[in-house]
Amino acid sequence: MNAASLLHLLQFASPALPIGGYSYSQGLETALEEGLVRDAGSARAWIARCLDEVVARWDAPVLWRLLGAFAARDADAVTQWGQCFLASRDTAELRAESVQMGYSLGRLIAELGVADTGSLGEDVTLPLAFACAVDGLDIPHEEALLAMLFAWVENQVLVCVKSVPLGQVAGQRLLLSLRPEIERAAYLARSLPDDELSNWAPGLSMLSMRHEVQHGRLYRS
């Protein structure tokens, strides 16, 4: 991986990227409210399980396929997987999250001259916009996948640091301890066949729906 690609990847995987990732918890805030997550141990268990059962088996594999579709200039596959991901958002908040962040990232990369996002259509999701940015910047796919997974885990850890609460050192310890799970998630994303992809997590969906009416929310999902 050359220096330019690495620097591009660091920029587009950074939490400083102005697309609003810090304002979402993806149901974790409700898990905190209901006592399912209450300390460092339960936080690690929650993040690891969501990473393995949802992100590694759906979000990341869809991104992996979008990366391949952009590289192959396969517009039909780009459209197919973009629509599949949008259809998989099974609550209003999760759908709004991905569309808002996808719109923000798409607009950003267009304004920066990275890629033309005009052909991606409406309701561009975050994986679709991220894959477009990776293609426009010629970032290696395996590294881009790892960056996406790390960014997801980091955001979940930051929610726990703010809301469990955990100390900063405890948060960094938690993030470091999840490295094997991130590597496994990347392997699954690259290796799972299409008919084994799944985001079946009804408990998480229920938490997400309850978050819509939760009192005193800090996060938008």
Image (spheres, rainbow, N blue to C red):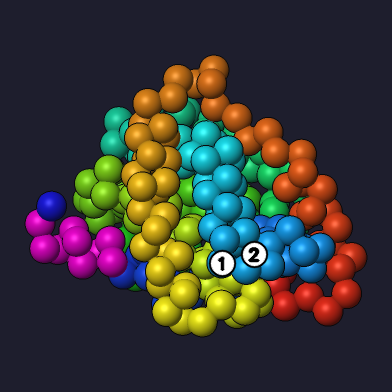
Q: Which residue is mark 1?
A: 40
Taking 135 as reference, is 23 above or below it?
below
Asked whether, in this view, residue 66 is left or right of residue 207, the answer is left
Could you say which is closer to the camera, residue 72 or residue 158?
158
Q: Residue at x 44, y 24 (%)?
A: 192
Could you tell me how far apart the alpha carbons at marks 2 and 1 are, in whole angstroms?
16 Å
- The amino acid type of the residue labelled 1 equals Ala
Q: Residue at x 46, y 35 (%)?
A: 61
Query: What is the magenta range?
Result: 2-10
Q: Identify the mark at residue 163; answer none if there is no mark.
A: none
Where in the figure is residue 112, as x and y percent of width and height? 34, 70
Mark 1 nearby-residue class (10 Å; few <14, some 14–19, many ≥20): many
Q: Which residue is mark 2?
A: 25
- Tag 1 secondary structure: helix
Where in the figure is residue 190, as x and y percent of width and height? 36, 32
Mark 2 nearby-residue class (10 Å; few <14, some 14–19, many ≥20): many
> Is any part of residue 17 visible from this angle?
no
> Is any part of residue 188 visible from this angle?
yes
Q: Residue at x 83, y 54 (%)?
A: 209
- The amino acid type of the residue labelled 2 equals Ser
76 in the magenta segment = no
Where in the figure is residue 102, as x and y percent of width and height? 54, 58
- Dominant secondary structure (helix, strand or loop) of the stretch shown in magenta: helix
Could you say which is closer to the camera, residue 158 or residue 12?
158
Asked whether, in this view, residue 161 is left or right of residue 171, the answer is right
- Tag 2 secondary structure: loop
Which corner quadrant of the image does residue 200 belong to?
A: top right
